[in-house]
Image (tube, rainbow, N blue to C red):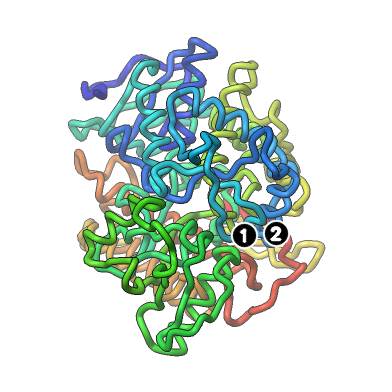
């Protein structure tokens, strides 16, 4: 299916990194509208992305619905805990219906009622049942199937089993990526425009719903190139993942609670409103587990009629795992699920580096704020992937034309992040020079951390180091954090980075085909950044909870960024 040839491919007009909903939507649109030479580069195969694991569906208000985009907007803003940008959310809810219609035109098949009308699910944080789904809870797989088929027919180059290592920057513009080809050789892939659509970073944590490939590659590449990254402290934990040894953890969709499934503690009592946003429910479960000492709570689905018909995918997975949801409660616990922040973009998906664009989970568009509303992620990828394409085809070449403004020493996106300026710039842990902002918050100017002298190259196996990283991030930077836990994690991450420096600090130090070391480098870079931003945010807001700062503070109604 893919282009498995080694050696550098011909120069492309647009190179898309990643094969999830955002990247494939962009590639299909480019090929159909512009006739551009498009390439899709993915470290697995096209079908192997986080999108295919998405269960819940796509939240959208279609013409004729007894709903409104204003309600969808209001629900999104409420879930985002004061950090959503309303202009970006307005784009999402207004343009989303057209993107859903296009997806149906491509062949995506959503569940329908006997009348033929599209069936809708109610999920946590939504005031109306507006979530489209396929196969009950197999929406991501259906979306991915439709887009993969379209891309296979239209993309000029499909580079499967290629691993993007770093952005190539020449004269202040992104010109492509350095990548490991299938043979393990480092090869330049040249392109006029690069679209980061490489997904999330659930593999930072020991318990996650994300596949093994979700190692934060796009955000890490952007960080190393000095591109502005924001909001990565807001990691959403899905409250209802099956407590089971298999990894990634099987996701028990939000839609079950929308249909009446109940959360129960070890005594069988309810302890939280099941339809609250995910951050609220996850924290309630974490508090219950901390108090009881148990490893999981229970999800009671025994009162749901026609479970196997409504949710066939989950039903099959549960039977395979040895559970009958019609007869017994399901053991569940939160699992790392979605990073609300990422590479900062404007409303067109432009970053602060000309020639570099971002869409999907890798991006911070301002839509999610401090906590993503359920089933907005697939919609965001479709909407902003399309906006990237439209801007490129309109001749926009970089951030200056897309609404990014240089202010002093920093380059700040003025939309969609405009309403939340000022932005607090900080640096990864290491030697820092501190400066006072006018409002009294400490701003940290970025300086390069020292290169360790005399470290033993490759002294820690990358697989072992990855496990250690996941365990310490789960224990010290998970659902609830504090200054002491974040400091412990920061020291431990630094030690891991020192121990693996010879294998992970530069692409040239990688052994041919050493994807494990490259992924570890990305995870370490992203962990360092997350810990720095989580330490700087001395409040609790959305998916970021600090036990030492349990209240939300107006002083932190701002974004915390690194790079730029």
Would residue 473 be visible to someone looking at this image?
no
Rendering coords of residue 119 (x, y %) = 52, 43
Secondary-structure class at tag 2? helix
Q: Earlier in the sequence, mark 2 or mark 1?
A: 2
Residue at the image position 41 percent from the left and 78 percent from the top:
297
Rendering coords of residue 529 (x, y %) = 50, 58
Secondary-structure class at tag 1? loop
Q: To which quarter of the image does residue 548 belong?
A: bottom right
* Front: mark 2 or 1: 1
Q: Quadrant of the N terminus?
A: top left
Rendering coords of residue 434 (x, y %) = 65, 65
Q: To which quarter of the image does residue 330 belong?
A: bottom left
User: How many neighbours does mark 1 have within 10 angstroms: few (below 14), some (14-19), or many (20 or more)?
Assistant: many
Residue 414 falls left or right of residue 175: right
Residue at the image position 51 percent from the left and 70 percent from the top:
282
User: How many neighbours does mark 2 have within 10 angstroms: few (below 14), some (14-19), or many (20 or more)?
Assistant: many
Of 139 and 155, the residue lying toward us: 139
Is 189 above or below relative to 257? above
Furthest residue in direction right, as rendered = 438
Residue 135 falls left or right of residue 99: left
Is 553 above or below relative to 295? above
Residue at the image position 67 percent from the left and 35 percent from the top:
347
Would residue 133 be visible to someone looking at this image?
yes
Tell me the residue that label 2 is attached to.
78
Circles 2, 1 touching at the beta carbon (< 8 Å): yes
Residue 406: which disc? Answer: none
Residue 125: which disc? Answer: 1
């Amino acid at each position: 299916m893919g282009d498995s040839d080694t050696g550098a491919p011909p120069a492309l007009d647009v190179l898309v990194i990643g094969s999830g909903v955002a990247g494939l939507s962009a590639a299909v649109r480019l090929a159909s509208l512009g006739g551009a030479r498009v390439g899709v580069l993915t470290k697995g195969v096209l079908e192997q992305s986080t999108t295919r694991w998405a269960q819940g569906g796509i939240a959208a208000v279609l013409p004729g619905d007894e709903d409104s985009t204003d309600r969808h907007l209001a629900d999104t803003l409420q879930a985002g805990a004061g950090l959503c940008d309303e202009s970006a959310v307005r784009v999402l809810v207004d343009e989303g219906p057209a993107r859903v219609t296009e997806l149906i035109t491509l062949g995506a098949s959503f569940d329908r009622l006997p009348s033929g009308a599209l069936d809708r699910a109610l999920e946590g944080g939504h005031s109306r049942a507006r979530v489209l789904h396929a196969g009950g809870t197999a929406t991501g797989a259906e979306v991915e199937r439709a887009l993969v088929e379209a891309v296979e027919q239209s993309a000029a180059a499909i580079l499967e089993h290629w691993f993007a290592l770093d952005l190539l920057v020449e004269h202040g513009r992104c010109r492509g990526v350095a990548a490991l080809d299938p043979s393990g050789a480092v090869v330049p892939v040249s392109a006029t425009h690069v679209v980061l659509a490489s997904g999330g970073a659930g593999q930072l944590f020991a318990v996650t719903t994300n596949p093994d490939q979700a190692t934060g590659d796009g955000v890490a590449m952007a960080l190393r190139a000095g591109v502005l990254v924001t909001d990565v402290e807001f990691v959403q934990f899905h409250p209802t993942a099956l407590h089971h040894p298999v990894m990634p953890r099987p996701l028990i969709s939000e839609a079950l609670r929308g249909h009446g499934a109940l959360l129960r503690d070890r005594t069988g009592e309810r302890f939280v409103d099941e339809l609250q946003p995910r951050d609220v429910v996850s924290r309630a479960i974490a508090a219950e587990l901390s108090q009881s000492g148990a490893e999981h709570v229970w999800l009671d689905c025994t009162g749901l009629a026609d479970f196997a018909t409504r949710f066939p995918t989950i039903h099959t997975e549960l039977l395979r795992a040895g559970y009958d949801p019609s007869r017994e409660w399901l053991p569940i616990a939160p699992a790392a699920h979605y990073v609300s922040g990422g590479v900062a973009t404007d409303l067109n998906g432009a970053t602060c580096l000309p020639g570099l664009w971002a869409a999907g989970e890798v991006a911070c568009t301002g839509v999610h704020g401090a906590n993503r509303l359920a089933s907005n992620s697939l919609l965001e990828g479709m909407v902003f992937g399309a906006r990237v394409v439209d801007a490129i085809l309109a001749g926009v070449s970089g951030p200056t034309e897309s609404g990014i403004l240089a202010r002093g020493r920093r380059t700040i996106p003025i939309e969609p992040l405009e309403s939340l300026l000022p932005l607090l710039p900080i640096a990864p842990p290491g030697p820092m020079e501190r400066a006072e902002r006018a409002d009294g918050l400490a701003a940290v100017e970025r300086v390069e951390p020292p290169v360790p002298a005399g470290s033993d190259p490759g002294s820690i196996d990358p697989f072992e180091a990855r496990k250690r990283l996941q365990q310490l991030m789960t224990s010290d930077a998970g659902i609830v954090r504090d200054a002491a836990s974040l400091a412990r994690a920061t020291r431990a991450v630094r030690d891991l980075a020192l121990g693996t420096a010879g294998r992970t600090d530069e692409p040239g130090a990688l052994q041919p085909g050493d994807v494990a070391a490259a992924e570890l480098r990305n995870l370490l870079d992203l962990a360092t950044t997350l810990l720095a931003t989580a330490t700087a945010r001395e409040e609790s807001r959305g998916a970021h909870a600090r036990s030492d700062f349990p209240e939300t503070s107006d002083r932190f109604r701002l974004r915390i960024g690194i790079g730029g």
